[in-house]
Amino acid sequence: MTKANDENALLKRKLAAMEKEMEMFRKALSRPSTSVDNRSVVDDTYSDEGATVVIDMKKVFHKMSTRQHAVMQMLLGNSKNSEIAERFGVTESGAKTYITMIYKKLGIIKTGPHNKRLWAQDLITPYFSKISEEEYKSMSRIPKSWHRDYAKHGKTYRKIVEES
């Protein structure tokens, strides 16, 4: 009977751990959605383990370098780290460093069950889709279509990023 009791206790602990993890996912998914006003200014509010965090996306975008904007566009386009590394002529470790700096500016610094890349996309996409081309270019020095049109304008686009 002892072996059966031990197995039963182990299963109960595993079930409790899974339930806790599911609750963390539920909390992450229940974050309020982003609101965008007519001036293209977004304050994204979400709850992380009871603490409310407000992100002024306009400030975040202004603080980002041209290279970070280019990497951000690649993240929004679901590029892999290896693709980012190839585009910028760095190692995958270098690409991860670029991405980590964007996460830090977004306030995504904790590790855990959250997929940081999806979380970043969820925070960035509403603002990026609403901001005008002119306003974005004044912040980033690159067009909103930089990633999408890179194959067409590669050398010109790469030069802009390398000069920043």
Image (cartoon, rainbow, N blue to C red):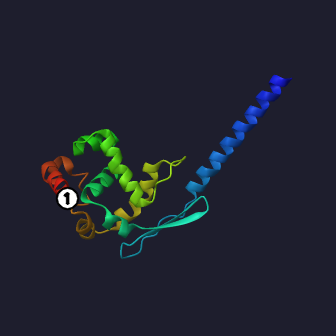
Q: Residue 144: x percent and y percent? A: 26, 60
Q: Please state if 110 lies on the left or on the right of 153 as rendered.
A: right
Label 1 crowding class (10 Å Cα cut-off): few <14, some 14-19, many 20+?
A: few
- Which residue extends farthest bottom? 39
Quarter of the C terminus within the rendering: bottom left
Disc 1, SS: loop
Residue type of the residue flagged with mark 1: Ser
Q: Residue at x 19, y 46 (%)?
A: 151
Query: Which residue is at the front of the view, 74 or 99?
Result: 99
Query: Which residue is at the front of the view, 62 or 122?
Result: 62
Residue 147 seen in render: yes
Q: Residue 84: x percent and y percent? A: 29, 44
Residue at which label 1 appears: 164
Within the image, what quadrant is residue 10 found in? Answer: top right
Q: Residue at x 37, y 55 (%)?
A: 102
Q: Residue 26: x percent and y percent? A: 61, 53
Query: Which residue is at the front of the view, 41 or 56?
Result: 56
Q: Residue 124: x percent and y percent? A: 39, 60
- Which residue extends farthest right? 1
Q: Residue at x 44, y 57 (%)?
A: 122
Residue 77 seen in render: no
Image height of 71 relative to 38, above or below? above
Q: Residue at x 82, y 28 (%)?
A: 5
Q: Please state if 127 lies on the left or on the right of 45 as rendered.
A: left
Q: Please state if 162 lies on the left or on the right of 74 as rendered.
A: left
